[in-house]
Structures are given as C-alpha cells and as structure tokens.
Image: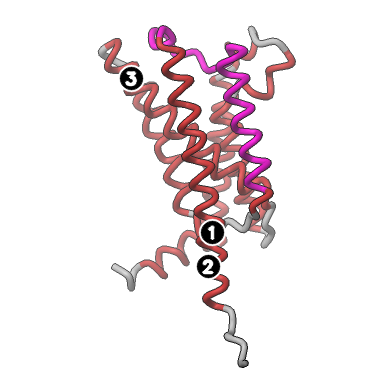
Amino acid sequence: MQSVIPYIRAALEDRRFLTLLFFINLGGTIYGYIWYESQLRITEPIFLLFVPDSPTASLFFTLAVAGWIWGRHWKLIEALALITLVKYGLWAVVMNIWTLVEVGTIGAAGWMLVASHFLMAVQAVLYLPKYAFGIWHIAVAAIWTLHNDVIDYVFGQMPIYGRIMEHIRIIGYFTFWLSIACIALAVYAWYRRNVSVAAKAPQQVK
C-alpha cells in the first residue's frame, strides 16, 4: 500500500486533475448558492454572507485549487477551505441522516446532498499534505468559523432543515464541537507539515 501512495499523491496534484477538480467545485458552489436562494430571500442583508455555509466553504476550496493550478498558496483561503469544507460537509451528512431518522425519508435530493457533502469533506482531507497555511491563518479561520456559529445559533440564521429544527439547541451544541474538531484538524495539518519540512531539512554539521 505504501508504494501506491506516491502515485495517488502525484495524480491528486496533477495539473489536469486539479483543473477538473476546480470546475467540479465551481459548479457545486454555483448550485449551492442557487439551493439557498429561497432562504437568502428572507434573510436580512447583514446576515447574507453567513447563511450559505456549504457553498461558501466550497468556494474557499475552489479558490485554493485555483491557486495550486497557478503554483500559488493562498494560505488564509486554504485554512478556511480545510476547516469549513470538513465542517459543513460532515454537518450536512449528519443533518440529513437525522432527518431520515425523524421523518423516515429524505428522497433522492437528500441522498444527493449526503453524497456530495461527504465528498466535500473527503477531498479536503485528501489534500492535507498540500496546505501551506501558518498558525495565524488557522486563528483567523477559527474566528470566522466560530463567529459563523454565533450568527447561525444566536441570531437564528442556520440552514432550514424542517422537522429537526425542533432540536436547534442540540444541533447548535453539536455544531460548536464540530467546529472545534475541524480547527484541531487544521492545527494537526500545520504541525504535520512543519515536522515533515524539518525532517527533510539537511542536518547542520556541528
């Protein structure tokens, strides 16, 4: 298995694959904003930036991929992409499965959301070795993420999920700790990269 990993990594970082990934995420981002259209119509302008969580997360990743294609690292965008893509990818999976348990069905659209959001989280994790952000980028992304939680659960701007909205306090508590876990993942990615760079650096002769 170890011998296969370099080939997988090379394929993931191939410019042609990155270009395909860019357009897939761009299309998903546009669809996501369209999906939120009905909720955005009833949202106060001051909250508009914080309502479409998943498409904004995929937008961050789309921009990060664009940077990689051009040989650039937009480090704050990368930190935002990792944290929010994993967070909202997993969040949507949990909310849809919860809806399935409560209601008994989520339909084809619900299963599409489960699959697409799970893949959002997976792609973010697959590129862990690629991110080049520093600790202060993580700090800014963490503030953005936790501030978004406040907007969603203090000011009532979370995505509307029908019947499970009865459990809003539990959902808010779960979301907070999911945010913390995703921030911790970013710290792990930063630490792992630093250790790898240090290991590759030539030893100084004393």
The residue at 45%/12% (across/down) is 168
Residue 68 pos. (x, y %): 63, 57
Q: Is residue 111 magenta?
A: no
Give the percent coordinates (x, y) of residue 1. 28, 67
Q: Which residue is mark 3?
A: 98
Residue 195's label in the rendered image is 2
Q: Which mark is residue 39?
A: none
User: What is the span of residues highlighted in magenta in the rendered image?
Assistant: 137-166
**Separation (CA) of disc 2 from disc 1:** 6 Å
State the residue position of label 1: 191
Q: Residues within 10 Å of mark 3 (few under 14, many from 20)?
A: some
The picture quadrant where one finds residue 26 is top right
Judging from the image, what secondary structure is the residue with disc 2 in? Answer: helix
At numbered mark 3, what does the secondary structure look like: helix, strand or loop? helix
Specify the amino acid type for callout 3. Answer: Trp
- Amino acid tagged 2: Val
